[in-house]
Image: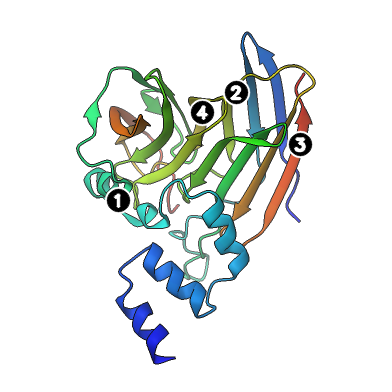
Amino acid sequence: MADPMKIRAAVRGDVVDVRVLMAHEMETGQRKDAGGKLVPAWFISDVVASLNGKPVVRAAWGPAISKNPYLQFKVRGGKAGDRISVSWVDNKGEKRTDEVTVG
Amino acid sequence: MSITRRKAVQGTAGAGLYAALVAIGMIRPGTAQAQAAAQIVTRAAFEAKGIADTLKALGAAGATEAADIVIVSPDIAENGAVVPVGVNSKIANSDMVALLVDKNPTALAGAYQFTDGGVAEVNMRVKMGQSSDVVAVVRADGKYYMAKKEIKVTLGGCGG
């Protein structure tokens, strides 16, 4: 099981500002190990962020996203007490979902 | 069996081949469902090299340059493994944003889709192998727009 995400969601004016830090290796598939063998690609390929269960931002990623990915986005129509959930799936089929309350 | 094998051979890249691989059980269906759920861009778009080919793979060839797209990033990034890049589209009804790095092994870094209140303004961190142009592609009302910015990298983020 992957490590939990760190998610911060706060009301800023008329939008909810969400910052997410995920724990993932994000291996490119270009790098060689000490033995000279290619390390296979391993990266988060899909992310879905929802406000009260309704998807607001989806992301499709390639291996060029940095290790331990950071994502920041904004959502209109949210208020304090709403739920923001973020899910990801990597190219090996591993997944993780975390949820926070907007503060 | 020879029929599915034929399909696998014929399927060019991406979606066709992907479906064929699912059909013959080489890729687990669970992954396939996740892919289908967030079909923002085809997986094949992530294989394209250079800006021109990637734009084509995104269906965004001939995107017009727009001053309303702002790429927020340092002009010089010290560490290519972690380059903070933000894309902010002020074009009305922007519903898709993609970020391309010209000189990376494959140009497309990530693509984002916005629905039900999601604002077309995202910040992320990407890897850059060397100094390169980065291109933001935005879709609004079915039309494609783009903006370009050069980021200099003093220490590459690939290999090493």
Residue on which disc 4 sits: B123
Checking the image for residue A75, the label placed there is 2
Query: Is residue A89 found left or right of B148 in the rendered image?
Result: right
Distance from Cα at disc 1 to Cα at disc 4: 23 Å
Marks 2/3 in contact by CB < 8 Å: the verdict is no
Marks 4/2 in contact by CB < 8 Å: the verdict is no
Q: Secondary structure at mark 2?
A: strand
Give coordinates of residue B149: x percent, y percent: 30, 27
Q: Amino acid at mark 2?
A: Val
Disc on the earlier residue, 2 or 3: 2
Q: Is residue B26 above or below residue B57?
A: below
Query: Do marks 4 and 3 share a subunit?
Result: no
Q: Amino acid at mark 3?
A: Glu
Q: Residue furthest top?
A: A13
Q: Secondary structure at mark 1?
A: helix
Camera-side mark, 4 or 2: 2
Question: Which residue is drawn at the image coordinates 51% and 71% (left, top)?
Answer: A35
Q: Is residue A93 visible?
A: yes
Q: Is residue A92 visible?
A: no
Q: Amino acid at mark 1?
A: Ala
